[in-house]
Image (cartoon, helix red, strand yellow):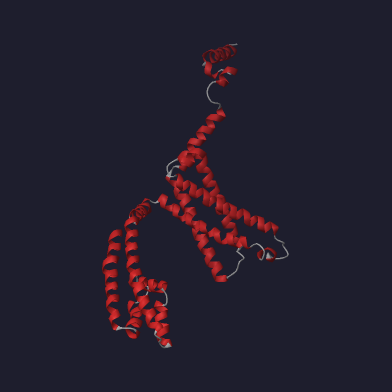
Amino acid sequence: ELHDDMRHSTMSMDVQGQPTDFMPDATNWEVGPSFFQRTRQQQKVWLQEVVNGPYFHVVATMFILMNAVLLGIQTDTMARQLNDTEPLIFKVMERLFCVIFIIELALRVWASGARHFCTQDGWQWNAFDAVVVGLQSFDVLLELIVAGLQDPNSGGDDLRGNISIVRVLRILRFVRIIRVLRTLRSVSELRTIIVSIFGTFRTLMWTLVLLFLVIFMIAVTITQIVTYHLMQGTDDSQQDALQEHYGSLGNSVLVLFQAITNGIDWKDMLNPLTLYISPWLALPVCVYIGFGVFALMNIVTGVFV
C-alpha cells in the first residue's frame, strides 16, 4: 500500500508540476517551428560554417590541383603515344573529379542560397566555377552518350570518322585547366602578385605601344632599304640572307623585337645589312639596340619592380 501511495503521489506531481509548454496538447504543436524545420536550419548553419571555413577551401584547392596534374599526365600520355584511345584509369578519374566538383559546387550553392550565391562578393568566381563545372559535366555526359551509341564490335571506328565535333570537344575540355586560377582566391600571396600585375597594366601597355612604334619605324626603314637593294639584282646567297630577316614588314618587326629580347643575337640580324648593303646601317641598328635595351627594357623592369 505504501508503494502504491508513493507511485500515485509521483504521478500526480509529474502531471501537476509539468510546464504547460510540454503538455501533449494539439495547440502546442503549432507554436514555433517544427522539429524538422529546426533541424533543417541547424543543418544549414552548420553547412555554412563548414563551407566558409578554411579547411573546405583548402580541400577544394587540393582537388583542383590534383585534377590539373591528371590533365597534365593525360596530355603527356596522349602526346607520347599518339593514340586517341584513353586508358580506363583516366576516364574513371575524370568522372570522379567531375562528381567531386559538382558536389562541392552544390554545397556552396546550398549553404549560401542560389540568389545570394549569384550576388555576394566574389560572385565572379562563383560564375567562373559554375561555367567550368558545367562544361566538365557536359563533356562527361557527351562522352557517355557517344560510348553508348558506339557499336561494341567496331572498336569505336564507326563514329570516330563521322563526329569530328567530339574530337573538338575532347580537345576543348582541357580548357578547364584554367580552373587552377581559382587557387588565387585561396592564397593571399598569389592574389597580391596578380593585383600588382594588373595595377601596372596601364603603364606597361603604353610602354609596349612606344616600343612597337619605335620597332615599326625602324622596320619600315630597313625593309624599304632592303627592298630597293633586291630590286637592283643580287645573287641568290645575298637574296636568301636578306629575305630571311627582312623579306617582309612582318619579318622585320619580328627580327627587331627578337633582337632586344634575346630571341636572336642582334649580330646575326645586322650582318646581312652590313655585308651586302652598307656598313653605315650598323649605326641606326646600334642606336635602336641601345635605346631598346638600356631605356625601354629598364622602364619595363622599373614598372614591375
* Residue 158 to residue 42: above or below: below
User: Residue 289 or 236: which is nearer the viewer?
Assistant: 236
Quadrant position of residue 28: top right
The mark tally for this picture is 0
Q: Residue at x 43, y 43 (%)?
A: 53
Q: Quadrant of the C terminus?
A: bottom left
Residue 122 position within the rendered picture, expressed as x and y whole percent measured from the top left: 43, 45
Residue 178 position within the rendered picture, expressed as x and y whole percent measured from the top left: 48, 56
Q: Residue at x 41, y 84 (%)?
A: 239
User: Residue 69 or 163: which is nearer the viewer?
Assistant: 163
Residue 43 position within the rendered picture, expressed as x and y whole percent measured from the top left: 51, 36
- Res. 25 visible in picture: no
Residue 269 position within the rendered picture, expressed as x and y whole percent measured from the top left: 35, 78
Quadrant position of residue 231: bottom left
Q: Quadrant of the N terminus?
A: top right
Left or right? Give the position of 96 relative to 181: right
User: Residue 53 or 4: which is nearer the viewer?
Assistant: 53
Q: Residue at x 36, y 82 (%)?
A: 272
Q: Residue at x 53, y 65 (%)?
A: 75
